[in-house]
Image (spheres, rainbow, N blue to C red):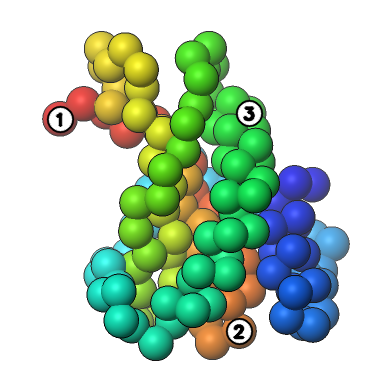
């Protein structure tokens, strides 16, 4: 499953054991818990940079996640939005957003990758069609 690839890439680079073969949950909607965007000088930024490189090198996986759940015909060009910390649940959230080229009802699509801290293990992925507000 493609979701394991993101985690496997990170684990391979950092010599961590690969995740179990059980599929990660891909959840429609957005991460439901409070999280605060991290500042550019936050201590997790070097690890986030490594995760982002892996994710962005495999951006097709983000497109697949959206297209598996939504009937999207237009091109999806994802951009990094932010990395946020849910300190209450020990989670790091990395958000990517692809704007709708012709927004009528939707602003675009977001993918939030949720990593469990402190080992930065990919825990779940949220995919959402973001409405215009």
Query: Mark 2: few, some, or many residues within 10 Å (few <14, many ≥20)?
Result: few
Nearer to us: label 3 or label 2: 2
Q: Earlier in the sequence, mark 3 or mark 2?
A: 3
Q: Earlier in the sequence, mark 1 or mark 3?
A: 3
The picture places residue 27, in percent across and down from the top left corner, at 52, 47
Q: Say whether marks 1 and 3 touch (CB < 8 Å).
A: no
The residue identified by callout 3 is 68
- Please say if 70 is above or below 23: above
Marking on residue 113: none
Q: Residue at x 65, y 37 (%)?
A: 60
Q: Earlier in the sequence, mark 1 or mark 2?
A: 2
Quadrant the C terminus occupies: top left
Residue 65 in sight: no
Q: Residue at x 58, y 69 (%)?
A: 50
**Element type where label 1 sits in the image:** loop
Q: Residue at x 57, y 66 (%)?
A: 51
The picture places residue 96, in percent across and down from the top left corner, at 43, 47
The number of numbered badges drawn on the structure is 3
Query: Mark 3: few, some, or many residues within 10 Å (few <14, many ≥20)?
Result: few
Would you say 43 lies left or right of 107 here? right
Residue 58 in sight: yes
Marking on residue 133: 1
Q: CA distance from mark 1 to mark 2?
A: 36 Å
Q: Residue at x 75, y 46 (%)?
A: 2
Would you say 132 lies left or right of 128 here? left
In-front residue for pair 22/120: 120
């Amino acid at each position: 499953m493609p979701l394991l690839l993101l985690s496997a890439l990170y684990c391979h680079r950092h010599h961590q054991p690969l995740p179990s073969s059980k599929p990660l949950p891909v959840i429609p909607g957005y991460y439901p818990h409070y999280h605060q965007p991290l500042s550019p000088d936050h201590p997790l930024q070097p690890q986030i940079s490594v995760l982002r490189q892996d994710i962005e090198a495999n951006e097709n996986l983000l497109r697949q996640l959206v297209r598996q759940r939504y009937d999207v015909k237009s091109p999806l060009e994802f951009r990094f939005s932010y990395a946020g910390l849910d300190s209450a649940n020990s989670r790091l959230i990395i958000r990517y957003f692809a704007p709708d080229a012709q927004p009528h009802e939707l602003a675009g699509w977001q993918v939030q990758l949720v990593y469990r801290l402190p080992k930065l293990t990919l825990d779940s992925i949220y995919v959402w069609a973001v409405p215009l507000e």
